[in-house]
Image (cartoon, grey):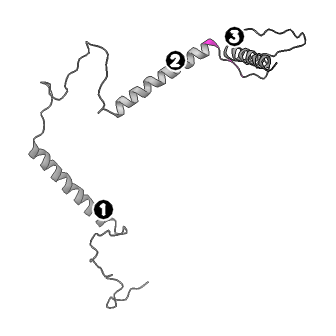
Amino acid sequence: EEHAQILADAMALKKLAVDYLHPELSVATSDGTALGRNYFTRASAPEQETVEETEERAQILADSAALKKSAVDYLHPELPVVTSDATACGRNYFSRASAPKQEFVEDSEERAQILAEAASLKKLATDHMHPELPVIISDSAACGRNYFTRPSAPEQES
């Protein structure tokens, strides 16, 4: 009797496993009062996409993937170019015959010195034209004295 019960449980489990793993199989029932309801066609079911909407979604996703690839290529020029075309070739922009001449090291050093001098002159001009800006110093031993509030200063009229 226990052996028969174990076999009956195994058969029921096998039926349940087949029903679960093969939802495309039709349901066979002998109960005339058994009812079923379609989950996908009920009134409260979420709307299903049409084939055109699905194709449009796929096209939009493909376009966004292509845009992302273009953005990565633009923002990271250091990455190598990957191509599957065996006939693709490239030309070096800098070593072509019509390329502009490269600047000499002395010229670039002189340019850097001129730019540094221009930056320091701009800082001096800003300091002169905007006395309200605070003075920033890097020397901790530097000190200053206010000319207008010293004891020997002439009295100011308000």
| 123 to the left or right of 149 | left
Which residue is disc 3 drawn over? 24
> In the current view of this chain or complex, which residue is farthest to the bottom?
152
Question: How far apart in space, not on screen, are marks 3 and 1 (Cα)?
Answer: 80 Å
Circle 2 residue: 59
- Please state which amino acid type lies under the numbered disc 1: Thr
Q: Quadrant of the N terminus?
A: top right
Amino acid type of disc 3? Glu
User: Which residue is at a point 37% across and 69% down the rendered structure image?
Assistant: 132
Circle number at residue 26: none
Disc 1 is placed on an element classified as helix
Local crowd at mark 1 within 10 Å, few (<14), some, or many (≥20)? few
Residue range highlighted in magenta: 46-51
How far across and how far down the image is residue 68, in percent?
43, 28
Closer to the camera in the image, 52 or 153: 52
Q: Nearer the viewer, residue 13 or 96?
A: 13
Classify mark 3: helix, strand or loop. loop
- Quarter of the image holding residue 43? top right
Cα–Cα gap, marks 3 and 2: 30 Å
Would you place residue 97 above or below residue 128 in this image?
above
Looking at the image, is 88 positioned above or below residue 64? above
The residue nearer to you, when weighing 12 against 109, is 12
**What amino acid is labelled 2 in the image?**
Gln
Distance in Å between CA atoms under marks 2 and 1: 56 Å
Camera-side residue of 154 and 28: 28
- Please state if 136 lies on the left or on the right of 104 as rendered: right
Say which residue label 1 marks.
Answer: 126
Residue 49 counted in the magenta span: yes
* Marks 2 and 1, the one that precedes in the sequence: 2
- Is 34 one of the magenta-colored residues? no
